[in-house]
Every structure is written in C-alpha cells, then in structure tokens.
Image (cartoon, rainbow, N blue to C red):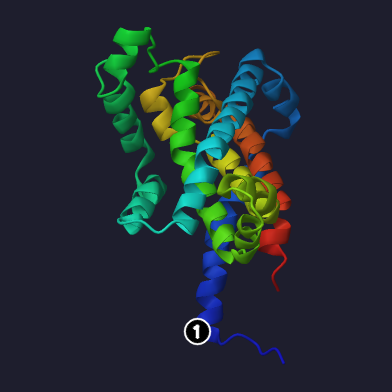
C-alpha cells in the first residue's frame, strides 16, 4: 500500500525537482524558435556538429577497445592493488575536466612525458589537432563505460565461463563466446553513456585541443563561443545538445527509467 510523502520530505523534494527542471524549461522558453532553422542551418554549426559526432563516436570506439578488457580485469582477476587501480580508473569522473586537459598536455604535449618521444620518434604532435579532441573525450568518457561494464560483469554468473574453460575453451575464447553475449546490454549502456559524455566534453577539449573552427571546435565549444557573441545562437546550439541528451535517456529508459 502506497502512502503519501511526509511534508518535511515532500517540500525539499519538490524544490530539488524545480531546481533541476527550471533551467531546462527556461532554455526552451527562451529558444528563438522563429530563427532556429537559420541558426542551425549555418555551415559553422554543421561543421561543429559533424566534428562532435565523429569525435564522440571515435572516442567511444577507443573506450570500448580499451575499457571492456579493463573492466573484465577489475571484475574477474584478483591482483594486488586492484582497489587502487579502480580508484585511478574512476578518477577522471571527479577530476575537473580542465585539470584533465592540463594533465594530457603534460603527458602527450610536444614536451610531455610521452609526447616528446612521439614527436622525436614518429613526428606525431597530438595537441591542438582533431586527434587531440578524440583523446580528450576518451579520457573523460572511458570511466563511464568501465564502471558500467564492470558492474554487469560482477552481476553475471562466472560459472558459465568456468564451464566453457572446463570443456577446453581458452579464457579468451570463453570471454569472446560466452561472456560478451552475457554482458552485451551493459556494454551497450556503457557505450551510450560514454558517447554522451564525450559529446558534451568541454574543459579537457579546449585545454588540450584548443578551439579551432573546422578542426577542434566541437558543439560545446561552439556554444561557449556563441554565448559571447550571439546569445540566441548559443541557445539554439544548446537545444541540439539537450535533444541529444534526451535521446540518450530515452535509449536507456529500460535500464534507468523503468523502475517504479
């Protein structure tokens, strides 16, 4: 039997809901709907949107290739310092993005710890390139995928893998033929979260990749630039990112929103 919420809990709950929803409503109310097609039809917007989609998808692919094995390692293998490794993996979630960008510069910049060798040995210079956008987005987005996949792996019954190895399959074959199909929904959810986080990344991108139209200017950077020169255009661009966020939530409704 459901009961009504007590007033001391109901009031702050409603205030909290209003605090979260009001800015989004204000964005919709202030959207220049009459000039929206012109705002979104400009070449600059389409270049920024195309770059955002390509880089976010590339960053998600990098996160999948590196993050799924990392999640399996954290969930299935006992080794000294596993808790520390997990903490380091999740650190970008709480690290200010601009600090992440500075850290990437110190590591992969032309004079960075690794970047100097990339430059001298292979002639690769990552900062302020489109590749730098992908690297920055993958850095901040991969933890979302790792956490999601690790949680799914911990919930999956490891006896299926053990049965496969007992029948002669190698651990990699068991992972590929048994584990991956079992955790596919968790991988999909983690990939969607990583993609959405990569699409909205700002701080690490502007610090490590800069803000060059057509090369490193993604949608969040375009919003920031437009806010200084044309607030109406900034609102229109923000509406696009809001629509993407709503689409992501709709895609994850079975995972998050179906609970009653």
* Residue at horizontal 40 percent and vertical 17 percent from the top: 126
Query: Residue at label 1?
Result: 8
Q: Position of residue 31 (x, y in %)?
A: 66, 37
**Percent x, y for residue 15?**
53, 68
Q: From the viewer's perspective, tell me whether residue 77 is left or right of residue 82.
A: right
> Residue placed at 67% from the left, 23% from the top?
39
Image quadrant containing the C terminus: bottom right
In this rendering, would 27 be left or right of 118? right
Q: Is residue 179 visible?
A: yes
In the depicted structure, whether residue 182 falls above or below residue 41: below
Q: Quadrant of the N terminus?
A: bottom right
Say which of 138 and 44 sits in front. Answer: 138
| Quarter holding residue 125 | top left
Left or right: where 145 falls relative to 255: left
Q: Position of residue 185 (x, y in %)?
A: 69, 53
In the image, 36 versus 96, the foreground residue is 96
Disc 1 crowd rating (10 Å Cα; few below 14, some 14-19, many 20+) is few
Q: Which residue occupies 71% across, 45% down?
A: 247
């Amino acid at each position: 039997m459901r009961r009504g919420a007590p007033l001391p809990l109901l009031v702050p709950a409603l205030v909290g809901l209003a605090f979260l929803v009001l800015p989004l409503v204000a964005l919709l109310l202030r959207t220049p709907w009459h000039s929206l097609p012109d705002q979104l039809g400009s070449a600059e917007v389409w270049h920024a949107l195309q770059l955002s989609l390509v880089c976010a998808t590339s960053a998600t692919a990098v996160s999948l290739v590196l993050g799924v094995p990392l999640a399996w390692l954290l969930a299935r293998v006992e080794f000294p310092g596993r808790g520390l490794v997990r903490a380091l993996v999740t650190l970008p979630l709480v690290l200010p993005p601009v600090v992440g960008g500075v850290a990437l510069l110190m590591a992969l910049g032309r004079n960075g710890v690794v970047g100097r060798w990339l430059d001298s040995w292979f002639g690769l210079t990552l900062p302020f390139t489109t590749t730098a956008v992908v690297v920055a987005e993958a850095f901040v987005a991969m933890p979302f995928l790792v956490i999601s996949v690790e949680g799914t792996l911990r919930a999956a019954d490891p006896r299926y893998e053990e049965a496969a190895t007992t029948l002669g399959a190698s651990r990699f074959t068991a992972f590929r033929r048994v584990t991956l199909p079992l955790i596919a929904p968790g991988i999909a959810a983690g990939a969607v979260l990583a993609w959405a986080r990569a699409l909205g990344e700002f701080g690490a991108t502007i610090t490590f990749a800069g803000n060059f139209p057509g090369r490193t200017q993604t949608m969040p950077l375009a919003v920031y630039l437009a806010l200084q020169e044309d607030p109406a255009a900034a609102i229109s661009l923000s509406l696009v990112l809001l629509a993407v966020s709503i689409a992501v939530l709709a895609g994850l409704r079975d995972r998050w929103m179906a609970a009653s």
